[in-house]
Amino acid sequence: MRHSPESARKRGYTWQWEKARAAFLSEHPLCRRCGDAGVTTPANVVDHITPHNGDPALFWDRANWQPLCKRCHDVKTATEDGGFGRIAYSALPRWLMPATCELHIVCGPPGSGKSTHATQAARAARGDVIDLDVIVSQLARQPIYQCREPAVLALAMRERNDRLGRLSQLPASRAVWFIVSAPGERQRDWWRATLKPRTLTLMPAALGQCIERISADPRRAGVRQQHIDAAQRWFEREQQDRPVHSSACGVDGLPTDPAHPWNLGAAAAD
């Protein structure tokens, strides 16, 4: 949440605070949360461990201060503020521009193998991968699939969208794989029309295969049932999004709807 300069001063963030902040960061230059995760990151925020809510004693209590990087501070603040409803993001950001790089979109339900497929392809091409699950893991400093904080998901979705927005500025020689579930042909058509990828791959996996893979994946311990439920919802959405064809038949007993699969198959054979 952004505050005006006047609001910040009223909450205690004066020049005296700026002086104390600089001195504290000089003494504690590394992010504490990153350090707890075994990562070395410069700190640039002095965080109040317990929100002071305007209490001057708690505000100036150095025992209530900790050094954080901006990313860790954003995650902590969003979690405290109930950030899921306060952080603006869109699952289908309509402001995106077509990618100027070599973009490959990989779609499918949980357990379909889309992450493995994209990661292996990107490694072979020395490309990059945009994967929401990985971004959530990085923001939360937790193993993949284990963070279920709505606020962190909101921040991760915003970060994903920022990365997608930068695809329109990359050179044509750069290769990127974007992983998204995209249930239903309408969603996949939206991503095709919006980002203009070189390829869009729908992973060929049946629901039973997805459930087997989810159940066998040790990284999904504690969230297996949620991922199985998500896979089932994906296939339900996929089924609902299929076009409805007329079942009317002509005198020859064949369907009269030109969009019926039978007629489409006959046209392809011709």
Image: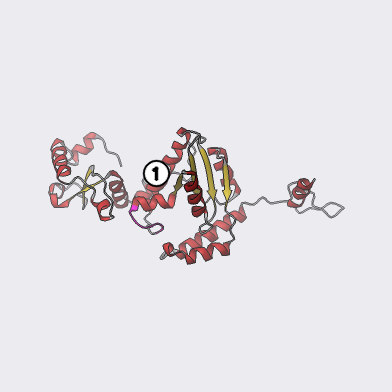
Number of marks in picture: 1
Q: Is residue 180 visible?
A: no
Which residue sits furthest front?
A: 124
> Residue at (23%, 37%) from the top-left corner?
7
Instruction: Identify the residue at horizontal 26%, vertical 35% (top origin).
Output: 4
Circle 1 SS class: helix
Which residue has dot 1 on it? 159
Quarter of the image where the C terminus is located: top right
Q: Which residues are magenta?
A: 140-145
209 is higher (above) or lower (below) than 123: below
Which residue, as the protein is rendered here, is positioned at the far right?
251
Q: Position of residue 184 (x, y in %)?
A: 59, 50
Which quadrant would residue 17 be assigned to in this image? top left
Front residue (pair 173, 212): 173
In-front residue for pair 116/47: 116
Left or right for 163, reference 182? left
Q: Position of residue 118 (x, y in %)?
A: 50, 50
Disc 1 residue crowd, few under 14, some 14–19, many 20+, Cα 10 Å: some
**Observer-nearest of 199 and 91:** 199
From the top left corner, tell me how far across and down residue 16 is, in percent. 12, 38
Q: Is residue 151 left or right of residue 73?
A: right
Q: Position of residue 18 (x, y in %)?
A: 16, 38
Examine the structure image and report whether residue 142 is included in the region drawn in magenta: yes
The amino acid type, in three-letter code, at marker 1 is Glu
Q: How is the image coloured?
A: secondary structure
Name the chief secondary structure element in magenta: loop
